[in-house]
């Protein structure tokens, strides 16, 4: 076996082809840096578990931005701090892949703080390797969220102070408080004993994912001689004496045994099943009708329906539009929206037209339904000459003043109340409209109602309301 | 297939699923929330992924992750959310990750309001994030197009390896119209996307990446992107002409404005004014050549927008020093002009 000792693990590239320049054999890391050790431990684990082929490594922003130079896996380089979100997207759409997010302290604990917190809290079945070296290495030694109190950096030249920057953030402990996380451990790579412990933790974290046990994270304290302006040897001492005093090593969360394995079910659907589930195979009553069969004053109506919120104006309009569609006409429906919403009225606007519909807005309705007084006051003047106003005499104590339009006054609310609920007023209006205008057939209107009403148990009562509206209209 | 009366926003969801979209990642915002609601309902029913992200920033990054594996990913938002997504969009443009993003525009700047507007034009069409990138931008003006152009968006995103926007306003999103949904698209992603990182032996040498340390390499990468955009400009321009053949005044606008303009053109024609409509369906690539032609053949071109004149700049660029005079009419803050208002404006221009 001796010959095997001298090769790189298969999870690691032999030659760093993605690395620009002539030197394809050495990493870009500084002498004495901790990243390389952790890289090697991960690569060995990927080989030993036989998962390198299905692993996708995520390269963050920071010193480990070039993780993709080194790992013989699928590689994705991402924005600063976003690796856990990207990992989520990958894992959710490719549950068979092994997704590893490799991040530094600025990336994970500062700019990406919410991303790691939320991914951990969702229990994403991913593995995060978090390198804590208490500094921003790549950008030139600035303060990190993990920088120790008193530690001097380019952006804390007088030393980090509690008053100005608060205490260093303990991510392993913080994330361990989340109910959903499975395995979290803090390790270090400053000496062989701790490298061995890190090796174990790396394996455990990856295995956790392979076994479908959910979110795992290893926080590793690592040397940054360049950033710390120390020799590599002094860097290892600094970890032992300073970092470990504040960031204690050890397991902060381990519920691997208790956690039930979860592998999302795959669902392959036929085209027919897809259409069924999208509701596209639904049968609708279709009765072709010629607009010329409608009295010319009611043809191609522009309808505005207005009232208080809760009077069902949107549903009223929807039923008319649904029914119009079932006659083969073009229709549009828009709820009151934008500035229209102000002023105490809710309204919707419906076009039913044999020609293509341009503007869906109804500025000058040919049919106005006014269910309350503010609506009548507001929209009466806008009705087209020769148009028609349906108004709710239960709630409007004046007759419309226009003498160039048809006026239909019906106590819609009182009738609805008689039928058992004020909420049926809108369908009483529908009955009155279809009886008065002969625009929409009864059967298509009922079919339209059936589709528009979500809770089907209310359909019979609404049909009764439509029938009553027809009867009331006939009486006039 | 029978027609369904459906909101534009919901038509986007069904269109996306029929186009084989595997996942939706989004964050709620009015007036785009129906897209999230619809996606939350239908993606799981079809065994696909819906996830409400912790932020707009995360949502686009989840799409970046999924899109990088070749999965057709959808997200949607409105102005303030698009601003946050710009980080991820720039990365996706640089790394050439296909993503479809719907922007149901509302009033800005800042929180603005939730009324329909078109004030994200510059942000979306010119590329709101950092770097030299452009996005394909499709501008539906009815519920049917909300479905059709979403499906087209996925095809174009894959074809050109680029994020594609479906850009419209709150009006088109909230409006219900009949939609005839096409057959589901059958896709075999694995055969088609040899660049993707799919978590298997065949694709493990692949890399999704936007960093190029070497200046010459990054310049080359940028040039490749520009070449791609030039190719898109050649092949993917889409627009709608309406009554332009004998027209003297061309009016132009996209989204809800184009609907108002079409009605206004009809009214003007009844009044004897020779007006016609050019509606850009793609905002990038912009129908420059068609506008140049109109610059020669029209007396006037009227640009109408729900913003401070963002598309106007593109129209002026395309028309250049040609004969037609370019006019502008706008409303902002969520106000949509009425047909009468536009007729009045066109009449005023016609009188000279």
Image (cartoon, rainbow, N blue to C red):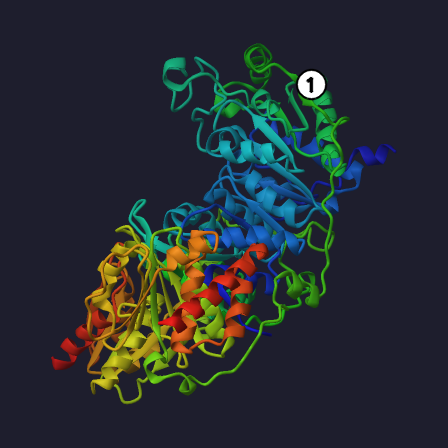
- Quadrant where the N terminus of chain A sits is top right
Residue A90 is at least partly visible in this image: yes
Place of residue B280 in the rendered image (x, y in percent of width and height, measured from the top left) = 36, 72
Q: What is the count of numbered marks?
A: 1
Figure check: A346 above or below A360: above
Left or right of A379 on screen, residue B204: right
Task: Tell me the crowding category of disc 1: few under 14, some 14 to 19, or many 20 or more residues within 10 angstroms, Cα based.
Answer: some
Viewer-nearest residue: A156 or A423: A423
Place of residue B170 in the rendered image (x, y in percent of width and height, measured from the top left) = 38, 58
- Quadrant where the C terminus of chain A sits is bottom left
Left or right of A213 on screen, residue B100: left
Residue B135 is at least partly visible in this image: no
Residue identifier under label 1: A194
The residue sitting at 43% across, 56% down in the picture is A416
Place of residue B283 in the rendered image (x, y in percent of width and height, measured from the top left) = 38, 67
Viewer-nearest residue: A222 or A80: A80
Left or right of A189 on screen, residue B169: left
Viewer-nearest residue: A196 or A456: A456
Residue lying furthest bottom: B246
Residue lying furthest front: A475
Q: Quadrant of residue B125?
A: bottom left
Left or right of B52 on screen, residue B328: left
Residue lying furthest right: A1
Place of residue B218 in the rendered image (x, y in percent of width and height, measured from the top left) = 47, 53
The chain that hosts pointer 1 is A
- Identify the secondary structure beneath mark 1: helix
Q: Quadrant of residue B327?
A: bottom left
Viewer-nearest residue: A200 or B154: B154
Q: Quadrant of residue B237?
A: bottom left
């Amino acid at each position: 076996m001796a010959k095997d000792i001298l090769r790189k693990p298969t999870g690691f590239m032999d030659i760093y082809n993605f690395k620009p320049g002539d030197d394809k054999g050495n990493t870009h890391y500084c002498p004495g840096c901790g990243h390389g050790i952790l890289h090697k431990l991960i690569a060995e684990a990927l080989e030993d578990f036989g998962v390198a082929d299905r692993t996708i490594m995520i390269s963050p922003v920071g010193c480990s931005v070039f993780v993709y130079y080194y790992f013989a896996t699928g590689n994705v380089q991402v924005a600063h701090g976003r690796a856990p979100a990207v990992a989520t997207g990958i894992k959710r759409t490719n549950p068979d892949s092994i997704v590893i997010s490799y991040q530094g302290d600025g990336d994970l604990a500062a700019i990406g703080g919410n991303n790691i917190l939320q991914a951990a809290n969702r229990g994403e079945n991913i593995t995060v390797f978090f390198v804590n070296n208490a500094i921003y290495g790549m950008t030139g030694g600035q303060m990190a969220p993990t920088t120790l109190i008193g530690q001097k950096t380019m952006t804390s030249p007088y030393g980090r102070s509690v008053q100005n920057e608060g205490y260093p953030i303990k991510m392993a402990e913080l994330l361990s408080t989340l109910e959903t996380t499975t395995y979290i451990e803090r390790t270090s790579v400053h000496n062989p004993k701790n490298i061995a412990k890190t090796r174990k933790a790396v394996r455990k974290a990856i295995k956790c994912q392979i076994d479908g046990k959910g979110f795992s994270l290893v926080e590793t304290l690592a040397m940054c001689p360049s950033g710390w302006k120390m020799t590599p040897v002094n860097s290892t001492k600094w970890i032992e004496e300073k970092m470990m005093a504040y960031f204690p090593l050890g397991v902060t969360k381990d519920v691997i045994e208790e956690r039930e394995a979860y592998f999302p079910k795959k669902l392959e659907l036929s085209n027919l099943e897809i259409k069924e589930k999208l509701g596209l195979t639904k049968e609708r009553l279709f009765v072709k009708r010629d607009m010329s069969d409608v009295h010319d004053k009611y043809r191609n109506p522009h309808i505005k329906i207005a009232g208080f919120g809760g009077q069902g104006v949107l549903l009223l309009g929807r039923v008319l539009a649904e029914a119009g569609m079932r006659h083969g006409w073009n229709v549009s429906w828009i709820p009151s929206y934008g500035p229209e919403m102000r002023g105490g009225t809710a309204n919707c606007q419906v076009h039913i037209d044999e020609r293509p519909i341009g503007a869906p807005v109804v500025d000058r309705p040919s049919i106005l339904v006014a269910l309350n007084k503010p609506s009548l006051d507001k929209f009466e003047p806008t009705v087209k000459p020769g148009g028609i106003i349906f108004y709710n005499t239960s709630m409007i104590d004046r007759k419309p003043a226009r003498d160039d339009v048809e006026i239909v006054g019906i106590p819609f609310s009182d009738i609805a109340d008689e039928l058992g609920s004020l909420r049926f007023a809108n369908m009483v209006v529908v009955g009155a409209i279809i009886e008065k205008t002969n625009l929409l057939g009864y059967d298509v209107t009922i079919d339209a109602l059936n589709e528009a009403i979500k809770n089907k148990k209310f359909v019979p009562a609404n049909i009764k309301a439509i029938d009553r509206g027809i009867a009331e209209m006939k009486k006039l | 297939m029978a027609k369904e009366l459906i909101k534009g926003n919901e038509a986007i969801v069904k269109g996306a699923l029929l186009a084989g979209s595997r996942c939706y990642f989004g964050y709620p915002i009015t007036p785009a929330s129906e897209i999230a609601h619809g996606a939350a309902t239908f993606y799981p029913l079809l065994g696909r992924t819906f996830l409400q992200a912790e932020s707009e920033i995360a949502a686009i990054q989840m799409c970046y992750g999924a899109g990088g594996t070749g999965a057709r990913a959808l997200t949607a938002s409105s102005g303030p959310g698009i601003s946050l997504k710009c980080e991820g969009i720039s990365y996706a443009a640089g790394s050439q990750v296909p993503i479809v993003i719907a922007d149901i525009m509302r009033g800005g700047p800042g929180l603005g309001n939730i009324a329909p507007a078109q004030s994200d034009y510059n942000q979306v069409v010119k590329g709101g994030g950092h770097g030299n990138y452009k996005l394909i931008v499709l501008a539906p003006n009815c519920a049917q197009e909300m479905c059709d152009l979403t499906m087209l968006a996925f095809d174009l995103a894959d074809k050109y390896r680029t994020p594609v926007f479906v850009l419209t306003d709150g009006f088109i999103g909230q409006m219900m119209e009949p939609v005839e949904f096409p057959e589901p698209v059958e896709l075999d992603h694995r055969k088609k996307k040899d660049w993707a990182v799919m978590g298997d032996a065949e694709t493990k040498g692949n890399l999704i990446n936007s960093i190029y340390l070497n200046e010459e390499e990054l310049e080359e990468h940028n040039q490749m992107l520009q070449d791609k955009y030039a190719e898109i400009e050649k092949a993917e321009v889409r627009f709608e002409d309406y009554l332009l053949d004998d027209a003297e005044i061309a009016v132009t606008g996209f989204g809800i404005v184009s609907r108002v303009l079409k009605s206004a053109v009809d009214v003007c024609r009844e009044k004897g004014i020779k007006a016609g409509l050019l509606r850009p369906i793609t905002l990038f690539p912009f129908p420059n050549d068609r506008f140049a032609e109109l610059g020669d053949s029209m007396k006037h071109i009227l640009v109408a927008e729900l913003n401070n004149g963002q598309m106007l700049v593109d129209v002026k660029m395309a028309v250049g020093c040609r004969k037609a005079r370019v006019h502008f009419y706008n409303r902002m803050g969520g106000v949509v002009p009425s047909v009468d208002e536009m007729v009045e404006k066109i009449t005023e221009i016609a009188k000279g």
